[in-house]
Image (tube, helix red, strand yellow):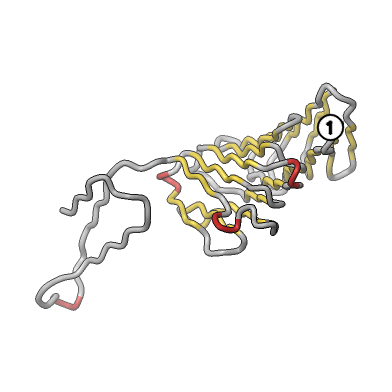
Amino acid sequence: QVLIDAPADGTYTMHVGHTGTLTGGSQDFCLTISGAFDPNVVVGAGPQAADGSPDSFLLSRTGDYLKVTVNGQSPEAIWINAVQGITVNGSTDQDEMQVQYLGTGFSGSVVLNGQVASGDVAKIIDSPGNDSFTAYPTYATLQIAGGYTVTANTFLYAHGYASQGGQDVAYLKDSVNNDTFEAYPTESRLWYDVPAGYGVRAKYFDYVHGYA
């Protein structure tokens, strides 16, 4: 047994060795790791935050792991059974955040925090099920059928995509100002009458409802 009292934040490497000679050159073993962990993961751009260059964030899934890729670098892998929430924080740089379909088995929440003044953009992809996209003046949420939610806060542009199948519905709700609703064959947009010109877009949805 190896016990670490009050471990510090960081990366730990465990090495499993043996003494003597193993029959057949190998031996099966079981390794159990236990302890307290925070099921809520927070991700930022690290040293590249607020450096004057645009940042990109991509949340995707490979096998049983959720992956957050920042500026194309090696992604941080998060075991899907060990996480309840993921928060991605932008900076004063111009950020683009995209959340792909994260599959089944994850029923937590994803929160994207941007800044309107920085011109940040959020792109949220649906699932094969019947999903709903709801947009308000300061945030937009995609509810995955029977699964997780993705919320984009204070982005200049928030895009919801219904490209994976299912019967998807979007609800675009206005502000107290003079907003503009636009409808086209494959997408609808709501432009909020605010100084920064914040806007949301619902693309490929089966039904789009605009509220004034």
Tag 1: residue type?
Val
Q: Quadrant of residue 209?
A: top right
Quarter of the image with the C terminus in it:
top right
Residue at left 84%, top 45%? 186
Q: Position of residue 180 (x, y in %)?
A: 90, 32
Whether residue 195 is situated above or below residue 9 in the rendered picture: above
Binning the other alpha carbons within 10 Å of mark 1 as few (below 14), some (14 to 19) or many (20 upward) gives some
The residue that disc 1 covers is 194
Q: Position of residue 50 (x, y in %)?
A: 64, 52
Taking depth in this image into account, of 54 and 135 the one nearest to the observer is 54
Q: Is residue 130 visible?
A: no
Q: Is residue 183 left or right of residue 173?
A: right
Residue at left 51%, top 38%? 107
Q: Is residue 36 left or right of residue 149?
A: left
Taking depth in this image into account, of 51 and 124 the one nearest to the observer is 51
Q: Quadrant of residue 73?
A: bottom right
Q: Position of residue 129 (x, y in %)?
A: 63, 40
Residue at left 75%, top 34%? 170
Q: Quadrant of residue 161?
A: top right
Q: Is residue 157 left or right of residue 69?
A: right
